[in-house]
Image: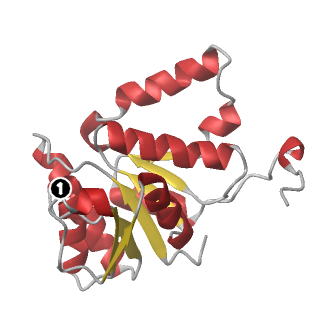
């Protein structure tokens, strides 16, 4: 993945109560900017979302926000972005994020963050894309989720090779290195069907 020009970051619209998560969000945005990687995210200036954007913008990074119209009315939209894309639905938002991103990173968040992560990894499992997907496990936030995924493998509901689609690291540098070195798995034969 040497042509990594943009990464979509999924994360919470709340800041939570763990300063380490806020610090890592700022660091991720800053590091992406320093490496000339465009940040694609959900367009808010609040919460962890806002911190990632701030980290990138404070370091002269390019930031693209994508948000549906109905959330634009409720959320505090970041007005200092490089580009703001407004669409109609949550599904259109995710499709646009996928379309303009070369990879994905998930920071801590709530239901929406989990939903975005699991949809994008399901698309990878189904062979709909071969982009790297990273989980930034800050301060043990995702320890229980990782344990649950291993249980899914042990109980026969998830294949080990599909679990391995999720790149996990505790540091920004480590995760970005994994994403850069990511080599897509071949698409399974049963998925090589004519989709036209």
Q: Is residue 79 left or right of residue 191?
A: left
> What SS does tag 1 mark?
loop
Residue 92 versus residue 40: which sits nearer the camera? 92
Specify few, some or many for label 1: CA neighbours under 10 Å numbering under 14, 14-19, or 20 or more.
few
Left or right of 181? Residue 53 is left
Scheme of image coloration = secondary structure
x then y, percent, for residue 183 = 68, 59
Picture quadrant where residue 27 is located:
bottom left
The answer to whether any part of residue 166 appears in the image is no
Q: Residue at x 67, y 31 (%)?
A: 160
Query: Compared with residue 106, is residue 6 higher up or lower down, i.e. above or below?
Result: below
Q: Which residue is mark 1?
A: 74
**Image quadrant assignment for residue 163:** top right
Query: Residue 79: image x %, image y %?
Result: 17, 77
Image location (x, y in percent) of residue 92: 48, 60
Q: Quadrant of the N terminus?
A: bottom right
Residue at horizontal 61 percent and vertical 41 percent from the top: 164
Residue at image location 29% in from the left, 82% down from the top: 61
């Amino acid at each position: 993945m040497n042509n990594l020009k943009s990464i979509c970051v999924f994360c919470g619209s709340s800041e939570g109560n763990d300063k380490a998560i806020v610090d890592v969000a700022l660091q991720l945005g800053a590091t992406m900017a320093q490496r000339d990687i465009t940040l694609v995210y959900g367009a808010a200036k609040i919460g962890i979302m806002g911190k990632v954007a701030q980290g990138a913008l404070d370091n002269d990074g390019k930031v693209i926000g994508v948000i549906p119209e109905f959330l634009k009315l409720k959320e505090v939209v970041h007005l200092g972005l490089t580009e703001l894309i407004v669409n109609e639905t949550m599904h259109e938002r995710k499709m646009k994020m996928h379309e303009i991103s070369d990879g994905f990173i998930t920071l801590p968040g709530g239901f929406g963050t989990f939903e975005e992560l699991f949809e994008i990894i399901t698309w990878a499992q189904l062979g709909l894309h071969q982009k790297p997907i990273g989980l930034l496990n800050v301060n043990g936030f995702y320890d229980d989720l990782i344990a649950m995924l291993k249980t899914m493998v042990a109980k026969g509901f998830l294949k080990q090779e599909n679990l391995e689609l999720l790149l996990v690291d505790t540091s920004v540098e480590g995760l970005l290195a994994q994403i850069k070195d990511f080599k897509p798995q071949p698409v399974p034969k049963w998925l090589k069907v004519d989709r036209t």
